[in-house]
Amino acid sequence: MTDLRTLHINGEARPVAIGPGATLLDVLRDTLRLTGTRKGCDEGDCGACTVLVDGNPMNACLLLAATLEGREITTIEGLAAGGELTPLQRAFVEEGAVQCGFCTSGMILSSTALLRDHPHASRAEILHALSGNLCRCTGYGAILRAVERCTGRCEQCANGGPGAARSAPHAGGHASNGSGAAATNALCSVGKPVPRVDAADKVTGRAVYTADIALPNMVHGGILFSPIAHGLIRRIDTSRAQALPGVLTVITGADVPQNTYGVSPARYDEEVLARTKVRHVGDPVAAVAAVDEVTARRALGLIDVEYEELPAVLDALEAVKPGAPLVHDRYERNINTHVAHHFGDVEAAFAASHHVREEVFTGNFVYQCPMEPQAAVAFWEHDGRLVLYSSTQAPHYVQYMLAHVFRMPLGRVRVIRPCVGGGFGVKAATNPLEVCSAVLSRKIGRPVRLVFSRSDMFHYYRGRHKQHMRFKLGVDAEGRITAFRSEIHLDGGAYSSFGVATAYYAGSMIPTLYKIPNYRYDGLRVMTNKPACGAMRGHGVPQPRFAFECLLNMVAEDLGIDPMEIRRRNAMTPQTRTVNDLDIGSCEFRATIDEVERESHWREKYGHLPPGRGIGVASGGFVSGAGYCIYRGQVQTQHEKGPEHFQKKSVFPHANAVIRVSEDGMAAFLMIGAAEIGQGSDTILVQIAAEAMGIPHERVHMKSEDSDISPLDLGSYSSRVTLMAGNAVAAAGAALLERLRPFAASLLGCAEADVRARDGACFAAGDPSRTIEWAEAARRYFNEHGPLVATGCYKPPDGLGGDYKGATVGTSPAYSFGTCACELTVDLETGKVRFERFTDSHDCGTPINPQQVHGQVEGAIVMGAGEAVMEDVQFDERGRILNPNLHGYLIMTIKDAPEIFSGIVDSYEPNGPYGAKEIGEGATLPVMGAVAHAIRNATGVWIKDLPITPEKILAALDQRARAEGPTGQATSAHEVPVGAGP
Amino acid sequence: MITGELHEPTDLAQAADLLARFPGRARLLAGGTDLIVDLKSARTSAEHLVSLNRIESLRGIENQSGLRIGAMTTIAEIERSPLIGGPFVALREAARQMASPQVRHLATIGGNIASAVPCADLPPVLGVLDAALVLWSPGGSRRVALTEFFIGPRQTIRREEELLVAILVPAPRPRFGAAYERFALREGNSIAVASVAASLTLGRNDSITAARIMLGAVAPVPLPVRDAEPVLCGRRLDEGIDRAAEVAMEAAQPISDVRGSAAFRRRLVGVLTRRALRAAHQRAREASHD
């Protein structure tokens, strides 16, 4: 059985007790507490657990630890000897190759092995060596640049430091035009490619994610999920599980708080554990706590549940038909949300249009697939306070929801967010791990840890809604849009989750990009017996945006107008109110079109590429933060508080910051509950705080993870953090400087109003030669007044949006705009798409950190491109997921990733901190449309059904060949676009 | 969760003893890249795991008038071995495309064959190289042609007491070329949707004197297409390639799954057969004439 064996790890002989079936991964993480080796899938698919065995990279999850005696094992903790980063680790930090950090250990170990054997590895060798390490954040460009920098092969960076490295060829180059150049140059931290504040911890494996947390006396839990799509629970017998030695408790729907929960207050329809009915494969039914994970898993297998299976409804278009099985009795015809937004008179406008085209498009089930599985650790303090560690991107909403479920005041719930390994929306809602770990812990009086397996993640889902879209677009003779009508059925799965907002977003964002005088949107979010859909990067908008951009390109073809030109003719302009009452502020959309046209060599390529090669274009944009909170009224203090009337203003600030300066004046602690999930918010908020206070960013230390310490920020969703948290932090920094001003003035002997602070020094305006230390002024403050503390907060402007039902969704203080061209090759015999190059240009305002902007763009393009051609959660006829793993559900590897040019146009957003607005979600929106257009351009066929698989391309080519008949005329793939447009 | 007792024999006799001691209850553990995952997910179970990793005689590649590859040689070793070049280069190509670098350092050629997964990458190539397998038991060893080894998904003619110890690839004939064409849904770390290996030997005037085609991922077993051989032999490639591709498509018995429909797979077989034949032909023409 369990034997004492000696493993040689990082140069040390470690005697360790190993069970016969223990994998190296579990021994490293659980027994030796070397948690830098990450568990992303436990099936050998993701590479997050890569270690070196005798120098060769291997998956620790596939190795039995007991077989490794005598072998030399190197983990990430073994690389930075004596605390000094290796050149490769340093390159990862400086090139921005780290975002969420969950893949980083494995990436670095794979690269280390490569560079040891091939110090001058070619690009092809690097791609080959890293093809077993999946990354969901970076799009791989920065990772490739970091490794190439260490081979001495990267020409641009061979002689340069980190700044010079950012135009490595794989990225095709980056362009930051540095808007408001004069203003930016005066800044010290903002606008600079400052390396991430958490990067060093991530490249050394020191970063702690939720599943790495092991509290004293902690036990392990597991959740039993429904194996059927729809059924009544007739009986649950937990006696066999209870009797298993090591099992501490087993809970079912009868043992948990009866309050339902969810996201939208009007539709809290999720039970903690199903009481009478299960609604999808993966619905939580029971949970256990046991002394270890193996016992917990074994206990789940001993819970006997008797179901009465009910007919399941799996298709959104079937679910709305009379007589279809009801997923919830409360949603008639399974309609969860109905949106009817009618602006102007579309029918009259169509009748008067020069050209009208109507098409049907279908989306896919796309899963966010963060590399880090969700995890939660809960315990209860002696005074009855709940403490929860969770991998969440919206800690405040989790806190709010737990207070609701347990009927406690908000102040009695403490949520701690350790490092989060990516979210993309899936970690925005409160999940069963968070609730069940708290229930289990309360029952047994010990800390309980729950972690999703990769399969659990897919069955919990909350990924993209599959949208069935019927779109109709009318234009005048010049291609100017006269009217647009959108009818969408959103397949929502079994619960509401974020879906109400999704259904509104699917309609509201379309008019932000182009001027649409008449617009009608009818949306139905429909319940089906599949896992609930939720919010994913671009929330509700990417599929309608894909469809709209395709339709616009079709209309351009019909009229012989160049696709770039039709966009320019309809492009949104600054300071415009859209037909659905959204207020557009800064808008450099046209500049993005122009830049992409230029950088992609559009005119030389569009219509001039040989068959099988194509170029396409699409545009997109997003909100910079939702204008309104998910729940209404004041911040909740008591669960008994009744619903409040909606007001067209924010009752409380969405982002709140506190800054405290250390007693010696040499450090500042920035406290704000903004959720760093890999996107880099901790870093840009530190930059903003430093800039606002006038000290170097190295002196600012982020405290964003603990709700007891950091004031409320609504979290990382709706691309809100840069603008909203950034404004709160800038305000706190400015307030702090105000407090310091009298002390600096007296030291400088100048008027208070003349005090300037910059880079750790204070000086009098007009006399920058004489300076005093900023810290000296801060020390004076402390000596007289005690702690130097200031606060800042941000509320979106009052009155955003119109006065109709649902007018709030889509409101924002600012909007981003972007355009993207895709160039690709299609193998006309197999249908296989090979991406060559993306050219992206974005109006994200004035960037706080251009390196991070490019990182978001590259990640968004690779995610969007994969979503367009390969990502699809597939279900069988009984509602079971056919590919709940990373070898069946494919995300792009480094070998699939295209070359990317990322450009930032000059822009300044007055509502944003230092002129900034969002990038993370907006950058994903043009991608799918550009891909579909490029495939059309390469093959002559439009695929309107996502994902655009090789099989669909071949089927469409066949259909066209049949339509053309045996004589095979007009077989050129380019019969339409050649010579099109002025 | 993995239960069961782990055994680490250091020679074949010890391994045979263990198999004899636990009939029907022992599983052989090679690289473990399939078995460990199956054990964790309880798709399979084993009371006894007999690891072959400490049997040194099962490792290594030799070339003495043909290749002898130890069954526990890893895919990465095949990918990097200077011996796997020239006429055997298709084997390297198949190894390079398989799974991920990490998995290739674990997975073994023996495991890739003996697990008899229909989409395995190495069997089609080894088949067209006329490889034979050495099956050893305490009673003696026997050689079987690789093409005769498979009888169904995860089923082979290997008897329970036998161990696959080596793979023999005969020395190349003059003017011989082989190639491997594979279709997958992404470039890295992928599973074949369909694959085709082909080899050709050319005679005078580039007429084909011997031909082999073997399919992967489109039948319950790695499938030799014997009916294509007479279509090609005695002809120049251009005269037989279309018909050979048709024969391969007819021979395929694909299923539909998450990676593609049966019809799509069958169509891929035609495309890949043509490509593999052309590449093999090119190599045969470039091969030395001696």
Image (spheres, rainbow, N blue to C red):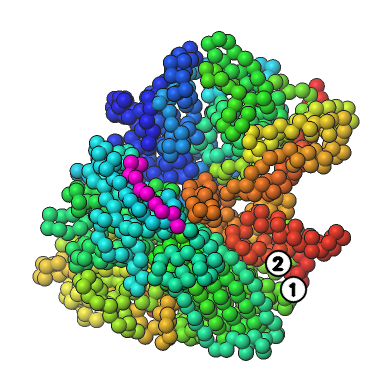
Horizontal relation, residue B131 to residue A846: left or right: right
- Disc 2 and disc 1: Cα gap in Å? 9 Å
Circle 2/circle 1 CB separation < 8 Å: yes
Seen at 19% across and 43% down, the residue is A217
Can residue B88 be seen here? The reply is no
Q: Which mark is residue A980?
A: 1
Pick out the residue farthest to the top. B139
- Quadrant housing the C terminus of chain A: bottom right
Q: Secondary structure at mark 2?
A: loop
Magenta stretch: residue A305 in it? yes
**Which chain is mark 1 on?**
A
Q: Which mark is residue A606?
A: 2
Magenta stretch: residue B147 in it? no
**Which chain is mark 2 on?**
A
Range of magenta residues: A301-310
Please tell me which of labels 2 and 1 falls first in the chain.
2
Q: Position of residue A154 (x, y in %)?
A: 54, 49
Residues tagged by mark 2 and mark 1 found on one chain of the structure: yes
